[in-house]
Image (cartoon, helix red, strand yellow):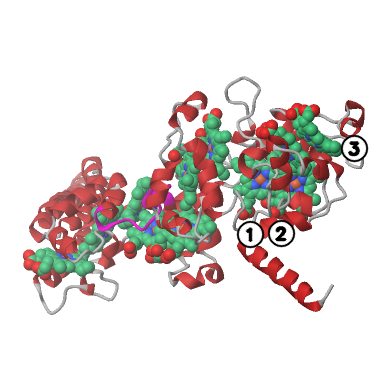
Amino acid sequence: MTNTVKYNKILILLIMLILNPAVILSQEIESKDACFNCHAITEGRLKTPADMFKSDIHFRKGISCAACHGGDSKEEDQDKSMSKSAGFIGIPQGLQVSKICAKCHSKEFETLSKSVHGQSSTGTGLVINSCITCHGIHNIIPVKSQGSKVNGANIVSTCANCHNNASLMKKYNPGLKVDQLEKYKTSVHGQKVFSGDSKAANCASCHGNHDIKKVNDPNARVYITNIPSTCNKCHGDANYMREYKIPTDQYEKFRKSVHGIALLEKGDLNAPSCNKCHGDHGASPPEVESISKVCGTCHVLNSQMFQESPHKPAFDKSRTHECSACHSNHEINKPTDEMLGTGEKSVCIKCHKDNDKGFLAAGMMKNMIDSLLKDVELANYFINAAEQKGMDVSDSKFEANDIKKVLITSRTSTHYGDIEKYLNTINEGFKITNKAKIDGEEAVNEYYFRRLGLGVSTIFITIICITLYFKLKKIEKKQKT
Ligand code: HEC
Ligand code: HEC
Ligand code: HEC
Ligand code: HEC
Ligand code: HEC
Ligand code: HEC
Ligand code: HEC
Ligand code: HEC
Ligand code: HEC
Ligand code: HEC
Ligand code: HEC
């Protein structure tokens, strides 16, 4: 072979490689697998598996067609190689498929068997998913590679093939929603994944792959108390999230918030997990409109009052989040009266200053609630004092309990952002404390009055006794004389 011929051949090879790598590979690949070699020169459905198999990870690892189909892969004779005596099983069917994969992937098989997909939910004995539903067949490539059926946008389509198919899903579970794909497409996650960024969450990032459980199973990754750590796997990993330039502290803040403590420590399932605010599949930051709706689904009164407040139109205009503006989003703490007023911890002074109406209202509200609390103390003092002196103050004590309710409604009524409405609510409190104070004071006074009466009568009796004594002495003297 002359040099030019050699170079021409290399050049042709290169051009072919650029135009179609598969062609060149098919010509170059030599296999010791007799099944492959013969099937590669057959036609149609017998040839296709061999063609596809060239890029399959199993082929690359030297695994023969016989590993799944049985038979003798060293035998070039058609009948002998595919004989029953050599263990040939033909085309594996139904449950057989996963069991074949399980010969080498037992861990995945076991996990899948315990998952919602590894069950037979129609009672026919046939399980919902076999390995090949998700991984395909004859063209299985490493799961992390872009073209893999279980990677990025591909896995979304794989799951959605069933979950977006209403008539198919109805056969298994008519109650299950089939809108996941539609919603997912609108989420930041979906938009990123479909534009080729496989770092954003796909169906499997949140649900798992072989271990998918029903969402109300406490072991499910999306069970309400497991969701924060499922999201946190990515959102709390500063390195993973670096390129996006968004905070990575949502979980840390949420964990310590009033909601996080209620959900994760007290097990209060009424408290919101990440998805209650962000949506399950439409996960994106809540829009200005939906955020107040979200908080308001649970905090109905606060939300209603806010809708009537002067803040509503003002916040709408400046696209300010209705509740987060004062409470934050992930770090919501137990509110205190210090959030009112004009002190350091006041939330009002973030926007109100220099004696504007809001600033004055904030100061007045704080003063009112402070003086109500002082009044409560005073009323309690009188009632306790009277009780200790044995007076019956059970009626007044009952009313003092109502004060707790007033404190709650007053604190809630800050959300009107209206000093008049606040005063109306809190005045109920002053009425109760005043009555309790008066009752308590009267009981104490009566106690002293009674004590005074007792003192006077004691002196009176003593005087009578002394007078009697002298009278007796006088009589005694008279008798002696
Ligand atoms: C010399 C050629 C040749 C060899 C070697 C060979 N096959 Fe085949 N194979 C064929 C032909 C031709 C058919 C279709 C004829 C038939 O259905 O019997 C076929 C059919 C099949 C089928 C489809 C069976 C069905 O029920 O439709 C499978 C699966 C298969 N072969 C796998 C293998 C495996 C695995 C090996 C190696 C252990 C192997 N073949 C070796 C030529 C070959
Ligand atoms: C990792 C396991 C595995 C390997 C390796 C494998 N197959 Fe298969 N093959 C299957 C399964 C599972 C099916 C049944 C797919 C289905 O149910 O649609 C199948 C189906 C087939 C069919 C029937 C296709 C049809 O459309 O009717 C043929 C033919 C076949 N395989 C040949 C081969 C040949 C040839 C090789 C090697 C080049 C090979 N298989 C390697 C698992 C395997
Ligand atoms: C519901 C879809 C689905 C089914 C069914 C499924 N897999 Fe997977 N599999 C996946 C996904 C998703 C991944 C992970 C992809 C990633 O990590 O990017 C995966 C990963 C794998 C891996 C790589 C190692 C690992 O465990 O992460 C192997 C091996 C594997 N699957 C084998 C199997 C076998 C064997 C079966 C049948 C017993 C099976 N799979 C059934 C979706 C599925
Ligand atoms: C004879 C043993 C054997 C059988 C049978 C087998 N596999 Fe594999 N599989 C392997 C080996 C070996 C690898 C390569 C593992 C590696 O690279 O670490 C592999 C790799 C894989 C991968 C890619 C894993 C990764 O880390 O990216 C998937 C997915 C997979 N197999 C699925 C299947 C499915 C589905 C079946 C059944 C249809 C099956 N395998 C049958 C041995 C087998
Ligand atoms: C960002 C995380 C996340 C992603 C991505 C995600 N899910 Fe979900 N999924 C959830 C949460 C959270 C729930 C609801 C749990 C609950 O209701 O308590 C859920 C519920 C479900 C349910 C139960 C029915 C329902 O809608 O409530 C199905 C089925 C489901 N998801 C499938 C999918 C499919 C298919 C995809 C991909 C298109 C997907 N999920 C993507 C988090 C996610
Ligand atoms: C072959 C069709 C099929 C594929 C593919 C599939 N699923 Fe399913 N999945 C189902 C069916 C059917 C059910 C309902 C089972 C039942 O309720 O009995 C289900 C149930 C679920 C559930 C539990 C819903 C509940 O009741 O709480 C989740 C979550 C889920 N699938 C997520 C996924 C994800 C994520 C993927 C992709 C990785 C996926 N599925 C792939 C058919 C499929
Ligand atoms: C597989 C990793 C991963 C998981 C798991 C994940 N996310 Fe994401 N998420 C991302 C990435 C990457 C982005 C894109 C960030 C960007 O573009 O700003 C994103 C974006 C978001 C955004 C939009 C942020 C913004 O302002 O742009 C929200 C909200 C969000 N995720 C919430 C969640 C919630 C809630 C969960 C759990 C139910 C979750 N994510 C699970 C990776 C993940
Ligand atoms: C009580 C409701 C609520 C809960 C619970 C919640 N979020 Fe948020 N989240 C919000 C609001 C409101 C925003 C702000 C949206 C904006 O500014 O556009 C936000 C913003 C985000 C963002 C965008 C980046 C940022 O920090 O501003 C991500 C990512 C995010 N949340 C993830 C999570 C994760 C993960 C969890 C659970 C650990 C969670 N969220 C729990 C309401 C909530
Ligand atoms: C799914 C229902 C739900 C959603 C949505 C929700 N919360 Fe809550 N929230 C609760 C529950 C339940 C508690 C009580 C926790 C505890 O103290 O045990 C609570 C407590 C609070 C508290 C403390 C109340 C107190 O008196 O200690 C504040 C403030 C609060 N939430 C604000 C918000 C804001 C702001 C939003 C929206 C960004 C929001 N919540 C969304 C259920 C919810
Ligand atoms: C203008 C600031 C501001 C806005 C906006 C705001 N809050 Fe508040 N919120 C407060 C202050 C201040 C307190 C504490 C009052 C106190 O303890 O005296 C409070 C207390 C609370 C409490 C505990 C008291 C109670 O009612 O049980 C809840 C719950 C609450 N807010 C929820 C919300 C929700 C939901 C929204 C949105 C609809 C919202 N807040 C909007 C300032 C605000
Ligand atoms: C995020 C900024 C912001 C915060 C925080 C805030 N306000 Fe406002 N407030 C406004 C805006 C904007 C208006 C309407 C414009 C105006 O009249 O100043 C307003 C109006 C008011 C008004 C009506 C004023 C009028 O002119 O009639 C009162 C009262 C008020 N706020 C009280 C409060 C109180 C009390 C707090 C703390 C609990 C508070 N605000 C916290 C922005 C805020």
Q: Nearer the viewer, residue 344 or 477?
A: 344
Q: Is residue 145 above or below residue 225?
A: below
Classify mark 2 as within 8 Å of ligand 2 or not, answering yes or no.
Answer: no
Q: How far apart in space, not on screen, are marks 1 and 3 (Cα)?
A: 33 Å
Kind of residue at disc 2: Ile
Give the residue pinned by disc 2.
24
Percent position of residue 186, x then y: 37, 51
Question: Label 2: few (<14), some or many (≥20) within 10 Å?
Answer: some
Q: Is residue 106 left or right of residue 135?
A: right
Residue at x-position 51% and y-position 68%: 241
Residue in the picture at 36% in, 58% down: 285
Residue to which mark 1 is pinned: 20
CA distance for labels 3 and 2 = 28 Å
> Magenta residues, as a range?
275-289
The foreground one among 331 and 56 is 56
Q: Secondary structure at mark 3?
A: loop
Q: Could you tell whether 100 is left or right of 282 in the image?
A: right
Amino acid carrying label 1: it is: Asn
Q: Residue at x 78, y 54 (%)?
A: 60
Q: Please identify the residue farthest to the top as the structure is shown.
A: 124
Mark 3 or mark 1, which is nearer the start of the sequence? Answer: 1
Residue topped by disc 3: 72
